[in-house]
Amino acid sequence: MTLPSSTATSTSDSTPTISSETCNTPGCQASWIIHSARLRGILRFYCTNCLLRNHPASFCPTCFAFYDSSPPHQSRRVSCSKCNSVTHIHCAGDAKSPPYLCPPCRDPDGFSFFRPVVDENGVRCMDKALSEVFLCAAKIAASSMNKAVSFYRGEAERKGREAAVAKKRAREALEDVVKLEEKAKAVVVSKAGVDQKPKQSVVASNGGLKQSEGSATTQVKKQSPSSSAQVKQEK
């Protein structure tokens, strides 16, 4: 199997960005990135070697069997004394006596899980052994992304429920505001009616006074001719 070559991409000449074409592990120069996985809640891109190094408890470092959250029983496994790696006891061989060290911990500087074969034309190739390593890394990446999908689906459902509750509370609050506004308007109208009643009574009383004054004046005018007649008779 031939591996394609790729180069890093960037948004400008001076500012590189995280790319799916380069390994995000500091110091790694691998450019045949083919795995995406989440590590500590952050989406990253790894070459096969770096992905396996960052997930030591997910596979056997000798036969590259993927554990899928179910490592071998304690009676059938041996743990590395330096990392979280778990190896089948039959894969550890003579090195299973404590303190056991997994292959990467035995040679931290020179060991690599994935070294593609380079042919005479300078093309990287994979044999059967490297294909098994690559397949193990691909299973780890798929499991990591599936867990991320499940986690964020749960988060989306939780936030959806919270949004529904907040919407209900907002609607109830708006209804309360409308009721308070209507109540305030009713109070204002009732107060205005109370204030207008005394004015009407005063106007009515003033009209009565004017009417009584007018009748008195009329009576005086009616009586004035008779009084003048009496004065003439006396003379």
Image (cartoon, rainbow, N blue to C red):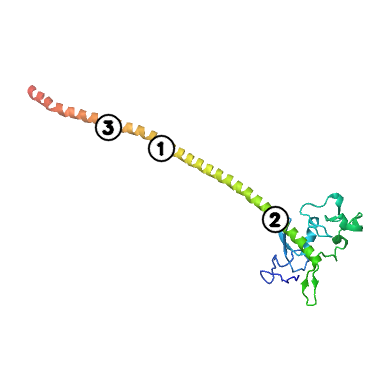
**Residue depicted at x 79% and y 63%:** 132
Mark number displayed over residue 146? 2
Mark toward the start of the polypeptide (3 vs 2): 2
Task: Determine the secondary structure under disc 3.
Answer: helix
In the image, 105: left or right of 178? right
Residue 164 visible within the image: yes
Instruction: Give the spatial CA distance, label 3 vs label 1.
Output: 27 Å
Instruction: Give the spatial CA distance, label 3 vs label 2.
Output: 92 Å
Considering the image in quadrants, where does the C terminus appear? Answer: top left
Q: Amino acid at mark 1?
A: Val
Q: Residue furthest bottom?
A: 121
In this rendering, is residue 133 above or below 97? below
**In x, y percent, where is residue 160?**
60, 49
Task: Determine the secondary structure under disc 2.
Answer: helix
Mark toward the start of the polypeptide (3 vs 1): 1
Residue 49 visible within the image: no
Q: Residues within 10 Å of mark 3 (few under 14, many from 20)?
A: few
Considering the image in quadrants, where does the N terminus appear? Answer: bottom right
**Can you tell which of label 2 and label 1 is closer to the viewer?**
2
**Can you tell which of label 3 and label 1 is closer to the viewer?**
1
**In x, y percent, where is residue 213?**
23, 30
For the residue pair 158 and 122, the one nearer the viewer reads as: 122
Mark number displayed over residue 189? 1
For the residue pair 137 and 20, the one nearer the viewer reads as: 137
Q: Amino acid at mark 3?
A: Gly
Q: Which residue is mark 3?
A: 207
In this rendering, is residue 59 above or below 186? below
**In x, y percent, where is residue 53?**
80, 60
Instruction: Give the spatial CA distance, label 2 vs label 1.
Output: 65 Å
User: Quadrant location of residue 214?
Assistant: top left
